[in-house]
Image: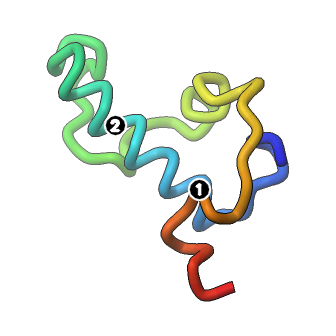
């Protein structure tokens, strides 16, 4: 499934992954003062992961399904 087909919990996992990977790889400059994953706009997250296809096992929140 593509990024536009993910549920809210899966998108939140991607937002957290994006935040921490960006912070680790590039420092705070790219995040422009965002200090928590919830501050990252979802449209940036979706654009970053566009073209990648996921399966439920890619997400922790899907383990109970």
Image quarter of residue 57: bottom right
User: How are the colours assigned in the image?
Assistant: rainbow
Q: Is residue 11 above or below residue 56?
A: above
Q: Secondary structure at mark 2?
A: helix
Could you say which is closer to the camera, residue 28 or residue 22?
22
User: Is 13 placed left or right of 64 in the picture?
Assistant: left
User: Is 21 placed left or right of 41 in the picture?
Assistant: left
Residue position marked by numbered label 2 in the rendering? 19
**Where residue 58 is drawn, which disc sits there?**
1
Q: Residue placed at 54% from the left, 73% from the top?
A: 61
Q: Secondary structure at mark 1?
A: helix
- First-in-chain label (1 vs 2): 2
Q: Is residue 62 above or below residue 35?
A: below
**Where residue 39 is drawn, which disc sits there?**
none
Structural crowding at the residue carrying mark 2, measured as other residues with C-alpha within 10 Å and reported as few (<14), some (14–19) or many (≥20)? many
Q: Residue placed at 26% from the left, 18% from the top?
A: 32
């Amino acid at each position: 499934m593509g990024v536009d087909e993910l549920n809210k919990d899966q998108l939140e996992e991607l937002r957290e992954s994006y935040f921490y990977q960006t912070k680790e790889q590039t420092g705070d400059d790219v995040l422009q003062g965002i200090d928590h994953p919830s501050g990252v706009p979802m449209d940036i997250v979706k654009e970053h992961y566009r073209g990648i296809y996921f399966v439920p096992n890619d997400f922790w929140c899907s383990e109970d399904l």
